[in-house]
């Protein structure tokens, strides 16, 4: 039973951290000029591209930090 609780806590942490990073990435991408790269940035394709770029960057950033956290927590088994 304790293992299931830890997995549940870890899942909730991952979900909320991913959402937190998504908000930060979305906010910071607002400063990027997509109209230079995309013909119609306000159209459906431009919006979808913006959304997919935000998700891709979110995945990279959150994976890095969550993996770092996981490895830092595993250091206790080293000593």
Image (cartoon, rainbow, N blue to C red):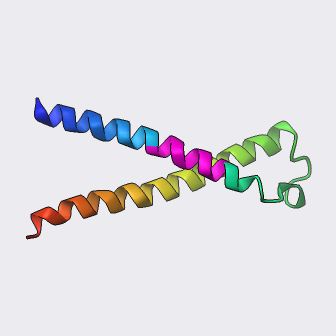
Q: Which residue shows up at 52% across the image and 41% down it?
A: 19
Quadrant of the image occupied by residue 42: top right
Compared with 1, 69 (above or below) is below
Q: Is residue 61 left or right of residue 11?
A: right
**Residue furthest left in the image:** 79
Q: Which residue shows up at 18% across the image and 66% down it?
A: 75
Question: Viewer-proximal residue, 52 or 21?
Answer: 21
**Residue furthest top in the image:** 1
Principal secondary structure, stretch drawn in magenta? helix
Compared with 52, 12 (above or below) is above
Residue 12 rendering spot, x and y as whole percentages: 36, 36
Q: Is residue 1 left or right of residue 20?
A: left
Compared with 48, 35 (above or below) is below
Residue 21 rendering spot, x and y as whole percentages: 54, 49
Residue 22 rendering spot, x and y as whole percentages: 58, 46
Q: Which residue shows up at 8% across the image and 70% down it?
A: 79
**Residue furthest right in the image:** 39
Residue 41 painted magenta: no
Magenta part of the chain: 17-26
Residue 73 rendering spot, x and y as whole percentages: 22, 59
Q: Is residue 30 left or right of residue 12?
A: right
- Number of labels in the image equals 0
Q: Which residue shows up at 45% across the image and 45% down it?
A: 17
Quadrant of the image occupied by residue 7: top left
Q: Is residue 44 left or right of residue 10?
A: right
Residue 18 painted magenta: yes
Compared with 51, 33 (above or below) is below
Q: Quadrant of the N terminus?
A: top left
């Amino acid at each position: 039973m304790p293992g299931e609780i830890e997995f549940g806590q870890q899942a909730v942490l991952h979900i909320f951290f991913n959402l937190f990073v998504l908000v930060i990435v979305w906010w910071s991408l607002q400063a990027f000029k997509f109209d230079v790269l995309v013909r119609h940035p306000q159209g459906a394709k431009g919006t979808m591209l913006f959304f997919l770029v935000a998700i891709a960057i979110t995945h990279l950033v959150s994976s890095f930090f969550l993996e770092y956290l996981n490895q830092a927590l595993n250091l206790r088994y080293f000593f």
